[in-house]
Amino acid sequence: MRDSRIQKTITPIDGSVLVERPLASERDIDTALATAVAAQHKWKQVPVAERVALVRRMVEWCIARADVLGREITQQMGRPIAYTPNEIRRGFQERALYMCSIADGALAEARVEPKDGFERFIRREPLGVVLVVAPWNYPWLTSVNAVVPALLAGNAVILKMAQQTPLVAERYAEAFVAAGLPAGVFQYLHMDHAQTARVIGDARISFVAFTGSVPGGHAVQRAAAERFIATGLELGGKDPAYVRPDAPLAATIENLVDGSYFNSGQSCCGIERIYVHRAVYKPFVDGFVEFTRKYQLGNPLEPATTLGPMVRADAAASVRGQIREALGKGAKALIDPKSFPADKEGTPYLAPQVLVDVDHRMQVMTEETFGPVVGIMPVESDERAIELMNDSRYGLTASIWTTDAEAAVRIGDRVETGTWFMNRCDYLDPALAWTGVKDSGRGCTLSKLGLEAFTRPKSFHLKLKP
């Protein structure tokens, strides 16, 4: 018997109910966990090459349906349809296939130096059943970081998608069925927070991969506190950029505008604060504002729209609150919201905003905004930029814009961040570990290290002659 409570997905496009799904019952949850445990015992015996082939077929299924899946993303969370199919065609495909390409080597047993009379090696054992708790903002990209490496490593996966994007979990299931994945190795559950906490506390869960807010990360930790299991936590950021005097200004402006406003600023690694050397501050700000005014805010199902609504009206209200607080403390807004007719108070439709005369007394420069607004501050030196970039409780990514790679590395060594970019931002390279410091979380996904995170080492110590 299913839970009589209904989970509703409200589209930000017009506020209507898009999807309704019953929450899983306790029997549903127990059955899913038992099935996952049984399926994983068999799945871990499947050779890595066969796991890889199956995941590749799943990816092919998704790529063939990228336009349909992209439209569903737009309807569920509001990103313009001009961009959403590329979440599948580009990022999802790139990450999944890269992890497939390195799986055999990353999961191979490690031989140690020879020792007479002994054979010694270390194998990577799957953890068991992995619970993936994924958010709505990039539903395919955030989930693939855990779903694919967990499966490649021989684990079973249960996916709990955010209420805003339930169709993603269902499409994963369809894709894996089409690819021939054995029943029970991948499952999804529509659950509320209390149910998710109970599942985390269940002895049949061996690892939790969570992407979401800092309070959400604390909730995961509390739920796992009585158990000796690991948790991977990606908790967002307040990502800074530093523009040096030698930066290639035109490319820097274009990329930082995109990094600030893509997905309506609803990106954990989006640019939220910019520090510009005073020598290029004015031309940078002028160019940034000019580029920002080119956005078209409106219905995300219209091909011409380049900026859609935020996910909910209350999310937009929170961003408006940060803007008002900054203006009350002396900041200046350079964009007139009236130039974006779709911007309406009380709705998810919010114009992009550029704030100057900002400082670190203001929330917009210290607290995660997760919306289409950015503050720009002048600085006199590299030293001051480093100080301000580190003045944050977050540390997911940070970027420097310069032609001096040596200076970029030297400065990057001192910036407290999980990823340090030069002349790019808001991107995950699957060959590199995706990780954060401070309140941006712990653990990592992607890269060889991300695959290993879904395994435990098992040592074999064989004395050949008793």
Image (tube, helix red, strand yellow):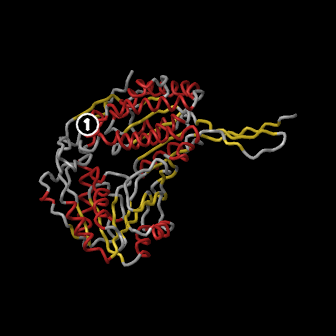
Q: Is residue 335 above or below residue 261?
A: below
Q: Nearer the viewer, residue 101 or 244?
A: 101
Image quadrant assignment for residue 57? top left
Q: Is residue 463 above or below residue 254?
A: above
Sort mark 1 into few (<14), some (14-19) or many (20+) by Cα contacts within 10 Å.
many
**Which residue is identified by label 1?**
71
Residue under the image location 43 percent in, 40 percent down: 144
Please tell me whether mark 1 sits on a helix, a strand or a loop.
helix
Across and down, in percent, residue 365 comes to 34, 65
**Which kind of residue does numbered mark 1 sit on?**
Arg
Q: Nearer the viewer, residue 221 or 401?
A: 401
Residue under the image location 16 percent in, 53 percent down: 343
Across and down, in percent, residue 322 comes to 27, 61
Image quadrant assignment for residue 337? bottom left
Across and down, in percent, residue 368 comes to 35, 58
Q: Is residue 192 left or right of residue 123?
A: left
Residue under the image location 20 percent in, 44 percent down: 300
Q: How many marks?
A: 1
Residue under the image location 46 percent in, 29 percent down: 186
Q: Is residue 305 above or below residue 410?
A: above
Of all residues, the one furthest to the right in this rendering is 466
Across and down, in percent, residue 134 comes to 40, 41
Q: Which quadrant: the N terminus? A: top left
Q: Nearer the viewer, residue 50 or 362?
A: 50
